[in-house]
Image (tube, rainbow, N blue to C red):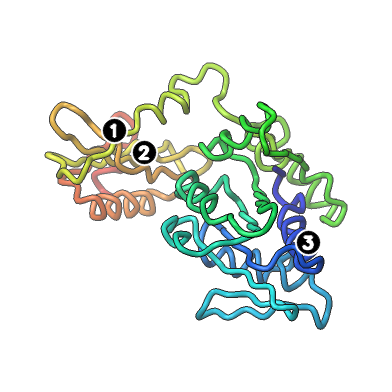
């Protein structure tokens, strides 16, 4: 776990490169948030697998087959955490999973990968991520704390001497002391803020599956900000089935102009099939009507 720019990608790429060079890895899974992330960050990025390899030892990537091949015959295959079922069938002796805290289907992807790690004497996986309080990140940390087969290492943004001193200083000056800095710069797992009315655990326990049923009514609600700046515009879609209301989507965002958040709300309404958009009237009610 590490902050932004702490060197996580370089660590992952160097680990895979070393395992290939020693001959202990022949079939490798590369799993990222999307296939684009695997190619642009893990493979072709400035700290990716091709960049850390010596001339003459660089692997070649086939986009059509999503396959990376080293001169010694070792192969790596790209997978997206958006599609856990793509990991059914293949098998590996090694895996590198990047930004697991940002995986859309984190636990399902991890479980499918675990079944596929069945080659060699000691299949292993390296997960690199800026920590977020997602189910998989907390699951791995619990295993480490319980003395399981997970080892955790940590690094902060400030520890990477290869970064611009001015840029690092500016980031810490702007965000030091905030929850965002603890997560994105110090690489800490930050869960609920003190006094939170709704905890993440309660939200996770409250998740429901519509089970393919159609909602009786869908509404998009808008809570407009007082102006353009740091205040967020709340844009949430909810649907009702029987006496239960499901929150379907949250498109809230900061720094939007009235026209921008209005377009965002209309776009969400079209996407979820909402029959009406409602907005808070005690703040900018006339502006809402105009938008």
Query: Measuring 35% from the left and 41% from the top, which residue is drawn there?
Result: 235
Within-10-Å neighbours for mark 3: few <14, some 14–19, many 20+: some
Query: Measuring 52% from the left and 43% from the top, which residue is drawn there?
Result: 229
The x and y percentages for residue 121 are: 69, 55
Query: Measuring 74% from the left and 81% from the top, which residue is drawn there?
Result: 71
**Label annotation for residue 224:** 2
Instruction: Establish if 81 lies above or below 35.
Output: above
Residue where numbered disc 1 is placed: 280
The x and y percentages for residue 156 are: 77, 42
Instruction: Establish if 177 lies above or below 53.
Output: above
| In the foreground, 177 or 205 | 205
Assign a secondary structure to mark 2. Answer: loop
Q: Image quadrant of residue 50?
A: bottom right
Kindly check if marks 3 and 1 are in contact, taking CB atoms under 8 A apart as contact.
no
Residue where numbered disc 3 is placed: 14
Q: How many numbered marks does the figure carry?
A: 3
On screen, residue 104 versus residue 263, left or right, reads right
Give the farthest residue toward the bottom.
56
Classify the position of the N terminus by image quarter.
top right
């Amino acid at each position: 776990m590490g902050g932004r720019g702490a060197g996580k990608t370089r660590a992952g790429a160097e680990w895979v490169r070393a395992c290939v060079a020693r001959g202990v890895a022949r079939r490798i899974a590369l799993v990222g948030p999307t296939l684009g992330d695997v190619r642009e960050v893990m493979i072709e990025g400035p700290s990716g697998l091709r960049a850390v390899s010596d001339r003459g030892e660089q692997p070649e990537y086939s986009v059509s087959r999503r396959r990376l091949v080293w001169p010694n015959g070792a192969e790596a295959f790209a997978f997206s955490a958006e599609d856990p079922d793509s990991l059914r069938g293949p098998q590996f002796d090694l895996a590198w999973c990047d930004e697991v805290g940002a995986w859309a289907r984190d636990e399902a992807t991890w479980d499918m990968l675990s079944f596929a790690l069945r080659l060699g004497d000691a299949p292993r996986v390296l997960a690199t991520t800026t920590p977020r309080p997602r189910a998989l990140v907390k699951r791995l940390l619990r295993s480490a704390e319980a003395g399981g087969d997970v080892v955790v290492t940590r690094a902060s943004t400030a520890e990477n001497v290869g970064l611009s001193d001015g840029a690092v200083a500016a980031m810490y000056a702007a965000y030091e002391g905030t929850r965002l800095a603890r997560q994105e710069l110090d690489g800490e797992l930050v869960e609920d803020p003190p006094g939170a009315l709704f905890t993440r655990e309660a939200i996770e326990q409250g998740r429901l599956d519509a089970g393919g049923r159609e909602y009786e009514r869908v509404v998009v609600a808008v809570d407009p900000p007082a102006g353009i700046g740091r205040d967020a515009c709340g844009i949430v879609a909810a649907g009702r089935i029987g006496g239960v209301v499901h929150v379907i989507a949250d498109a809230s965002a900061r720094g939007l102009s009235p026209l921008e958040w209005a377009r965002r709300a209309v776009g969400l309404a079209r996407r979820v099939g909402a029959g009406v958009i409602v907005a808070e009237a005690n703040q900018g009610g006339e502006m809402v009507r105009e938008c």
